Each structure stands twice: as C-alpha cells, then as structure tokens.
Image (cartoon, coloured by chain):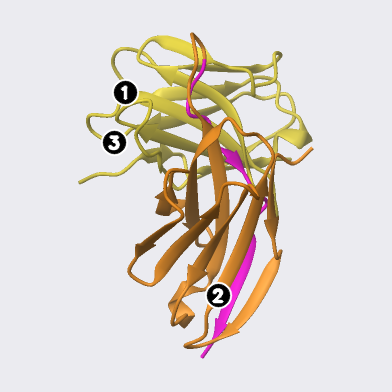
Chain colours: A orange, B yellow
Amino acid sequence: QQQVKQSPQSLIVQKGGISIINCAYENTAFDYFPWYQQFPGKGPALLIAIRPDVSEKKEGRFTISFNKSAKQFSLHIMDSQPGDSATYFCAASARPRGAGNNRKLIWGLGTSLAVNP
Amino acid sequence: NAGVMQNPRHLVRRRGQEARLRCSPMKGHSHVYWYRQLPEEGLKFMVYLQKENIIDESGMPKERFSAEFPKEGPSILRIQQVVRGDSAAYFCASSQGINQPQHFGDGTRLSIL
C-alpha cells in the first residue's frame, strides 16, 4: 500500500513551460513534505520542503502548493529548462513520538520529467 | 564542504557472498538513515542510526542485514549471504538533528551475479 501517491509517472514539457507534479497522502500524522530531484547515477537532492502550517512555498522557479484538507501537495516548476530533466520524488515524514521514532521519509514512486529544448 | 560520501559506488557480488556498504555522513551530522531503491521505484526506509545506536530498524529485513554506526568511522550496512533480490541502489542520508533535512549520498549500486 503506497502511503504517498505521486502522479504523473512521466511528464514531457516544452522549454519555458510549467511542470506540475502532484502527490497525495493518507496519514494525517505527516507534517513535513519535501521534494527531491534525482539525476541518473546520483542521489536525491533536496529541492524544497513545506510544513502544513503554510499553503505555499516558493524558492526561485520551484513552488510547493499544499492543501491540508485534501491531503495533497504539488510541485510547480516555472519556466522549465532542459537542465530540469530528472526524476522528481515527493516524500513525507511524521513528527517523531517516543523512543525509536524518527523522521524516516516515505516516498512517492517518482516522476520522470523531460523538458524539450 | 564534503557531502555524504558513500563507497563503493558500484559493488558486484556473487550469491552467498557478503556485501559491505559504507557511508560517511556530512561533517557535524550524527544522524544516519539508510534507504534502498529498486529500479523505477521510490526509496524505501531501512534503518535509522545515531552514533553507536540503532534507533529504528523496522525497514530492514531481520535476517542477513545489519547496520552499525560506530563512535569512530563510517556507518556500515552489511548484507550477508546475498541473493539476487538484494540487487538495488542503497542510499545513505545524514542530518544534523532529528528534525533537520536529510542530505543524500550518491549511493552504492549493488549487483548480485
């Protein structure tokens, strides 16, 4: 059972366009939602993250929109560039409670983004 | 500013052999997470360690897999008697504190012949 559902699986966007990737979750204990970018042969790199006390966070061309009531969050990449072509993962973690708990990340299955020149 | 360092980057083992994967966290980071990634899939949590302590190993198979993070030296993920199904990319992440962002290494790609 996938706790974090990500869509679409793949996405093709023209240079200069907007890339939108969506994620949905069920566990209301999640309170931290990062997005990671991964290039082939590399590890995931943290792009941007949000907590549920805000509905939107923007860093440069990357924006996270968060809808707490719908339990959904999305990544928008404005003015998409060929260099943005990569796999993007959403993730979530819950506040640690008690011994043994931690910020382990629960991951979506990823979105392969291709930006055409 | 060294990031999370993992080695080896690629590891080939035959069935039944042992695999040792090493992870040196970022300077100042004392929290280490190990994740496994199968092709075309997201990462799956395996184990979380702090210096000299395993805090949560709920994602790690109970047999053949073990992890450690000694007082000195890197964290080690050890897989004994490897099987074909262990073929995957294994990623290590470190953080400065439990509520701090996780930073990832470039992984070890384990192939089992």
Measured in 3D between alpha carbons, the distance from the residue under mark 2 to the one under mark 1, in whole angstroms, is: 36 Å
**Seen in the image, is A12 located left or right of residue B32?**
right
Q: To which quarter of the image does residue B14 belong?
A: top right
Q: Position of residue A100 (x, y in %)?
A: 51, 12
Q: Does dot 1 land on a helix, a strand or a loop?
A: loop
Using the rendered image of the protein, determine whether residue A87 is visible from the camera's viewpoint.
yes
User: Which amino acid type corresponds to the residue marked 1 in the rendered image?
Assistant: Ser
Question: Which residue does the image show at 43% across and 36% down from the upper left?
Answer: B93
Magenta stretch bounds: A101-117
Real-space Cα separation, disc 3 to disc 1, in angstroms: 8 Å
Decide: few, some or many residues near mark 2? Use Cα within 10 Å; few <14, some 14-19, many ≥20: many
| Pair 3/2: label in front | 2
Disc 3 packing (10 Å; few <14; some 14–19; many ≥20): many
Q: Is residue A83 above or below residue A54?
A: below
Q: What numbered label is drawn on residue B26?
A: 3
Q: Which residue is mark 2?
A: A19
Determine the residue located farthest toward the front in the rendered image.
A69
Q: Are marks 3 and 2 on the same chain?
A: no
The secondary element bearing badge 3 is classed as loop
Q: Which residue is mark 1?
A: B30
Q: Is residue B106 left or right of residue A114?
A: left
Task: Give the mark toward the camera: 2 or 1.
Answer: 2
Q: Amino acid at mark 2?
A: Ser
Residue B27 position (above or below residue A58) = above
Q: Tell whether position A103 is magenta.
A: yes
Residues at discs 3 and 2 in contact (Cβ within 8 Å): no
Residue B63 percent coordinates (x, y): 71, 14
Find out whether residue B65 is within the magenta segment: no
Instruction: Examine the image and state in which quarter residue B83 appears.
Output: top right
In this rendered view, identify the residue nearer to me: B14 or B10. B10
